Each structure stands twice: as structure tokens, then as C-alpha cells.
Amino acid sequence: MSDTSAKILDTAERLFGENGYDATSLRQIIAAAGVNLAAIHYHFGSKEELLDQMILRKAEPVNEERIERMDRLMARPGRLEVEEVLEAFMQPMCAAAAQNPQFVRVMGRLHAEGLLPSVIQRHFQPVVARFHMAMKRALPELPQEEFLWRVHFMIGAMAHTMCNSPEFPGSTVAASDFRDRIERLVAFLSGGFRAPAARSVGAELEVK
Amino acid sequence: MSDTSAKILDTAERLFGENGYDATSLRQIIAAAGVNLAAIHYHFGSKEELLDQMILRKAEPVNEERIERMDRLMARPGRLEVEEVLEAFMQPMCAAAAQNPQFVRVMGRLHAEGLLPSVIQRHFQPVVARFHMAMKRALPELPQEEFLWRVHFMIGAMAHTMCNSPEFPGSTVAASDFRDRIERLVAFLSGGFRAPAARSVGAELEVK
DNA sequence: GTCTATACTGAGATAGAC
DNA sequence: GTCTATCTCAGTATAGAC
């Protein structure tokens, strides 16, 4: 990778994280990076490709750790707890956030701009597959369709939580403290995944 | 309201719903509506103001019904169930979706583009305030901060659910069936809101 | 009061010289 | 590989016709 590419990637990462993808112009990036406008198109082809490369560079280590932790869980016999699976999925992102706060901001921003599903999510397939398997070991009795919907809900809550800060008065937690945030989120999601399925499908709601 | 304004609003609603806000240019709108470019700025001032007006026109009836249902709940003595409060908040959106599928698509798109928090959410303040009050009657023992975080999680799950379809094979539910979707979501969120609070709140913050 | 025609600024993209 | 110059199209602003 050339020096110019690296400078562009670093600068784009910072500016996208600070101001979002749409709000950041290529001209801002080249000014901050000290390179020429055409260099971006030479090295990356387009603004969107630049984004793609920038994400991949940072997401790969996170996903590798997720896969590792998920595989370690799967190697254990017996039933898994919902909390452990969720944590194995979420914690690596926290570690990345602690080391480089910009990264999670960028990811959140991208989801908020609707760019994750179309461009990036295919790179997360191996992680998602393992997450599904592990989660099913924690929730063997949950119907498949209900399970998939709940994963869907989880993704929304997770992305929104990573991107936005609730900004309420009297908060005792710094906006950048992702570990606290994730612990709260895991507790919430665990309750959601364990809830009895909505009655419209199987009519198994008698328990409550 | 003039005929031109109405044509612009209708067309903008359709195009924003189909292609998103950013991806829709004012020139596309005027071409489809058969009006002049400057008419938009004459009637609305800017593209963002146009969006604001478009949202308000559709969101007001929904919010009025939400407020009505919330007030009816609050008038009842005793403790409320989490499910009833969530349903009072969600159902009116379903009704609007059934009657005008475009509207929910627009709202979802806007959230996906990160435009809801900055521009629109102030119009939802009366609804949100009532929702908080009612929800606290259902969860009197939940600490305030944990409560606010969970509302935050809920917003993410809700917005993502309204905007995106999970697209898994063998689904027995049409993508446009928002009632089923909301029932599942309410079951999930209820479990989340009822979950025991994350343990970390006091402990790990001392160190910092 | 409403609307049209047209000009202005800044965005992403590209061709071709070096 | 890099840079200059230029293209197209976006949102915006305004002068003036009806």
C-alpha cells in the first residue's frame, strides 16, 4: 500500500467518523491529507470504494476475534447462555472501540446512512453464520422464524446504540464508554431473546 | 394549501419513499410533479424544509392517536403492563402503514439516512413524554438511567424493523404485514424491558 | 402572491499531460 | 503515480413575468 493510499484512508476514517459519509466531501479529505483530488479516484475508484476499503481494514481484526470467541463457545458441550453468545459477538467491537474510538463511530454512522446493508454486510457472513449456530444452542426451543426476527431486532438496537448517544441529563456514563453501553444492551437483548414467542404464530403464550 | 404545494408534497413523498432523501434530487421531483424548480423554494424554502413539511402532514394523525391511547392508559388506576404501553405506542404506526404503505417506508428511509434525530424528532416530543410516563407506571422499579437506555435500544430496534425486512427464506409472513411484525417486536421488547438491570452500573465506574 | 428562467457555488468524476 | 483542467449535476438564490 502506497503512502498516499494510507494517508487517504487515515484521513477519511477520521473525517467520516466526525462528520459522516455524506457530509464529508472528497475535497475536505484531500485538503486534510495533503494529496490531490484525483489521487482518490486513482487509488480507490470512487468515494464509495474508498469507504469500503476503509471499513475492511478495520473490520477484519474484529471479525476474526468474534469468530475465534464463537468457535470457543461452540467447542463447549451442553447448553450455552444467551448472555455469553451475545457478549462473544459484541465484546470485540468494544475492544476495537476502546483502542480506536473512531472506528465504531464510523460503523454506526454508516448504518445510520443506510450504507452497511448494501456494501459491507457480505463481509460479515462468516461471523453471522457462527452467531446463529451458537445462539441456537442457547435457545433451542425458539421457533426458527421468531429467532430470525429477533436477530433482526437485535441488529437494529445494536447499530442504533453504537451510533447514537441517548443524551439524557444526569447520565453517569461517558458517551464514549462502550463497555457499559454493551453490558446494558446485552442485558436488554437477553431478556428479549428469552421472552415467550408472540402468540400469533404458535399460541404458546400461556406461561406468563 | 395551493395545488402546487400539494403536488410537490405528494411527489416528494413518493420519490423519497422509493429512493431515499439524498438520492432524490429536487429536479426529479419537479419533473415528476410538473412544476418549476423555484416553486419548491418559494413554498418550502429548502429541500430540508420540504421534508419537514412532508413528514408533519403524515405524522400528525399518527401521533394524535398515540397520545389519545397513551392518555387512556394513564387514566386507568393501578399498574400497567409493558405490552399495553408498547402497543399503544406502536399500533397507530401500523394503522398508518396499512392505509398508506409509503409513509412508513419514508420514515424508515429517513431513519436509515440519519435524518430523523436532527430534523424531525422534536415534533415527537409530546408523544415521547407520555410514553415515558406510561412506561414508568409499568416498570416502577427500573432505575431511571437503565430505563432511558432501554428506550434508546427500543428506538433502534423499532426503526430498523420498520425500515428493513429480514429477508429470510421460508418466511410465512408478507414483508408488508406490519401487524405481525409489531406483535413480534412487542414481545421481544417486553422481555428486554423486564430483564434485570445490568450489574455493572455502580461497580466499574469507580475506577475511572 | 405565484411561478418561470436562469445564474451561482460546490459536489463527485474523468481525460490527458507530465 | 500524480496533477491540472474540465465535465456534469446537485442545491440554492434571485430577477422579473403574470
Image (tube, coloured by chain):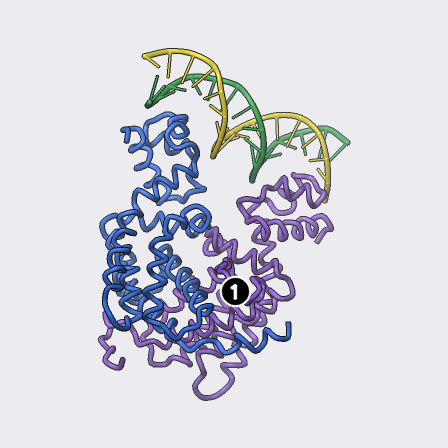
Chain colours: A purple, B blue, C green, D yellow
Residue A176 picture location, percent across and down:
58, 63
Foreground residue, B47 or A116? B47
Taking the image as shown, residue B73 lies to the left or right of residue D16, namely left
Name the quarter where the N terminus of chain A is drawn. Answer: bottom right
Tell me if residue D13 comes above or below residue A128 in the rendering: above
Q: Which residue is mark 1?
A: A171
- The image shows residue B2 at horizontal and vertical percentages of 28, 28
Q: Secondary structure at mark 1?
A: loop
Residue A73 in the image: state x and y as whole percent. Answer: 51, 81
Amino acid tagged 1: Ser
Q: Image point 55% across, 44% down: which residue?
A: A23
Q: Is residue A130 left or right of residue B171?
A: right
Q: Residue furthest bottom?
A: A78
- Residue shown at the point (57%, 78%) measured from the top left: B203
| Relative to B149, B14 lies left or right | left
Left or right of residue B185: residue D16: right
Q: Residue at x 50, y 54 (%)?
A: A119
Residue A46, image quadrant: top right
Percent of width and height locating residue A47: 57, 45
Residue that appears at 42% across and 75% down: A190
> Dividing the picture into quarters, in which one does residue A31 lie?
top right
Q: Nearer the viewer, residue A87 or B169?
A: A87
Instruction: Please indicate, yes or no, whether residue A146 appears anywhere in the rendered image.
Output: no
Q: Quadrant of the C terminus of chain A?
A: bottom left
